[in-house]
């Protein structure tokens, strides 16, 4: 059983997505449990506060270390083992297939969603195994980044994607290592004078595959020289 535990000040955002997303809807009979935890439940304070002003006088609030530490202790107890603890952070490693495959090796995963100015560094020192970034930009909280991480992880679990071949055939997949996939088409054959490339109608798998390989290399070269 794979367990993903997510700690957030707004778990309802995550619950709503998990409940309604086509990919997670297919989870019912899979060997996977996704649970959310309200950070306020781990507050040390009767008003359930979990954030405070920054030391050093800068504006903005910071999530306190102690409730976060308590949340990981709680999850560790619940699961009988310390989870791989991931903090969503713009200062982390950028999410890519290599990082995803490292995370996928683990059965117990906890994801922490930051807010405001971020989390007290001492929580990171004490509990966090990896900080993960979804890119060089800032969003207001870790909820959307955590969903991006989870959805990209789930795609690799057997049975989640109806046709697992399509995983290999996505950009960056086994058939497109470090490449963008290229264009795809469906009916009708002509729209406003724009035709589906002749070769895709040829019925010759070898030629189609060669065409796909060439166009994928060309597109990657044009759009993503960094790959
Ligand atoms: C407003 S951001 C805090 C940014 C922080 N002050 C900094 O400059 O690094 C609040 C939270 O949103 C999440 N977040 C924002 N951008 C992110 C990104 N690119 N990748 C992952 N998480 C992000 C993190 O959990 C972060 O703690």
Image (tube, rainbow, N blue to C red):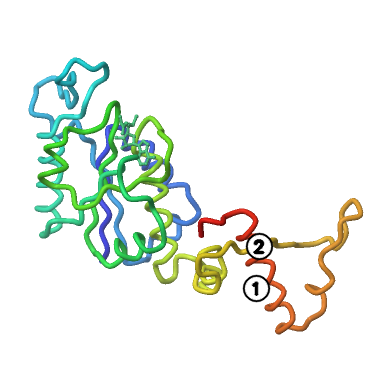
Disc 2: CA contacts within 10 A as few (<14), some (14-19) or many (>=20): some
Is 148 displayed left or right of 128 in the figure? right
* Element class at badge 2: loop
* Element class at badge 1: helix
Residue 109: percent from the left, percent from the top?
24, 56
Name which residue lies at 50% across and 69% down.
Answer: 177
Is 189 displayed left or right of 1 in the figure? right
Ligand 1 quarter of the rendering: top left
Instruction: Residue under label 1, please give it.
Output: 213
Locate the N terminus and report the quarter of the image it occupies. bottom left
- What's the mark number on residue 196? none
Residue 43: percent from the left, percent from the top?
12, 30
Q: Decide which of tag 2 and tag 1 comes sooner along the chain.
A: 2
Residue 30 position by quadrant: bottom left
Name which residue lies at 74% across and 62% down.
Answer: 185
Report, in whole angstroms, how far the alpha carbon at label 2 lies from the one at label 1. 9 Å
Residue 21: percent from the left, percent from the top?
48, 50
Name which residue lies at 26% across and 31% down.
Answer: 118
Residue 112 position by quadrant: top left
Disc 1: CA contacts within 10 A as few (<14), some (14-19) or many (>=20): some
- Residue extending farthest right: 193
Residue 174's place in the image compared with 67, above or below, is: below
- What's the mark number on residue 182? 2
Residue 9 position by quadrant: top left
């Amino acid at each position: 059983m794979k367990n993903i535990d997510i700690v957030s000040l707004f778990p309802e955002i995550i619950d709503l997505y998990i409940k309604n997303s086509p990919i997670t809807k297919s989870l019912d009979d899979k060997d996977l449990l996704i649970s959310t935890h309200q950070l306020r439940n781990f507050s040390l304070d009767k008003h359930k506060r979990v954030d405070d002003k920054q030391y050093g006088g800068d504006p903005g609030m910071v999530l306190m270390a102690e409730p976060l530490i308590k949340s990981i202790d709680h999850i560790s107890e619940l699961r009988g083992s310390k989870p791989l603890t991931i903090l969503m952070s713009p200062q982390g490693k950028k999410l890519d297939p290599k990082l995803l495959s490292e995370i996928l090796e683990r059965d117990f995963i906890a994801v922490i969603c930051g807010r405001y100015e971020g989390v007290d560094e001492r929580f990171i020192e004490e509990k966090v195994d990896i900080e993960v970034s979804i890119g060089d930009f800032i969003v207001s909280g870790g909820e959307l980044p955590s969903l991006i991480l989870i959805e990209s992880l789930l795609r690799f679990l057997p049975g989640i994607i109806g046709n697992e071949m399509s995983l290999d055939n996505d950009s960056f997949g086994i058939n497109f290592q470090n490449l963008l996939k290229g264009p795809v088409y469906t009916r009708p054959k002509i729209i406003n004078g724009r035709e589906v490339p002749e070769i895709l109608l040829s019925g010759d798998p070898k030629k189609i595959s060669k065409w796909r390989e060439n166009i994928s290399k060309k597109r990657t070269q044009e759009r993503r020289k960094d790959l």
